[in-house]
Image (cartoon, rainbow, N blue to C red):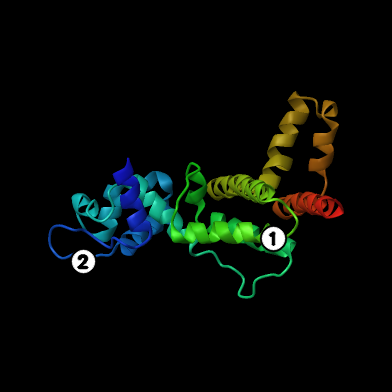
Amino acid sequence: MADHIERTLRLLWSTEDGPKRGPKPGLTVPEVVRAAIDLADAEGLDALSMRRVAERLGIGTMSLYTYVPGKAELLDLMLDAVTGERDTPAVPPTGWRDRVLAWARVDWALYHRHEWVLRLPARHVLGPNTLAAYDAALHALLDTGLTDGEVVALTSAVDGYVRGVARTSVETIQRERGTGIGERRRWTEEHYPVLARHAGMADYPAVGRVHAGGEPPDTFETGLHCLLDGIAARIAARAGH
């Protein structure tokens, strides 16, 4: 296990650039990772395998293992690589709220650009891009009067919120992509009439009321600002002590 972790960290931190045996390598580890990302973006995580990545690169599967020891390590490299693509603001925001909003929105965009990321189980990838993103997220709430423990907990809360809502959003987009029918249209034209006939929607007045109205507000932004309102209240309480 220790050797596995050491090898993965060497790959993540670019201290091991290619195979150590056989002929002179014709590829680099970043090229392997890019091919894997492109495959996952195009066909989804279920399509990702060492064999398919090797085919995309025009090499044998066994040759691929000389660059990356296995799929688990490849996923770590992929996740760290796409984290490095995060489109951070050119001029960092100054206030804590704007800083949190910035990284939350960047992550939201990342999850929609690389939908397969949300299929991965929670994993601690100790690569340079992942650590830099985490450090920036923590920094957003430092020097606000919160304790270090609260900074960690509230950063995790925002991260969990973004991931959770993004997962629902991406699943909805994928469903709409597959059916060609928007979720709101599906509800008003298909689900609601069926429920009205069989379930008696008069028994569920809140459901009928909220779904019969106009377009709902942006779920992600609404919930995010409410979460930040709660953090603001905690910061204000700390300042009052």
Q: Is residue 180 visible?
A: no
Q: Between residues 136 and 25, which one lies in front from this camera angle?
A: 136
SS at mark 2? Answer: loop
Check disc 1 and give the amino acid type: Leu
Residue under label 1: 101
Q: Between residues 27 and 179, which one lies in front from this camera angle?
A: 27
**How far separated are the C-alphas under marks 1 and 2?**
42 Å
- Residue 162 in percent (x, y) is at 63, 50
- Residue 168 in percent (x, y) is at 62, 44
Q: Is residue 63 left or right of residue 47?
A: left
Pointer 1 or 2: first along the chain: 2
Q: Quadrant of the N terminus?
A: top left
Q: Residue at x 79, y 42 (%)?
A: 211
Q: Is residue 65 left or right of residue 124?
A: left
Q: Nearer the viewer, mark 1 or mark 2?
A: 1
SS at mark 1? Answer: helix
Q: Residue at x 71, y 70 (%)?
A: 94
- Residue 128 in percent (x, y) is at 45, 61
Q: Between residues 233 and 77, which one lies in front from this camera angle?
A: 233
Check disc 2 and give the amino acid type: Gly
Q: Residues within 10 Å of mark 2 (few under 14, many from 20)?
A: few
Q: Residue at x 50, y 43 (%)?
A: 122
Residue under label 2: 26
Q: Is residue 222 left or right of residue 161?
A: right
- Residue 141 in percent (x, y) is at 69, 58
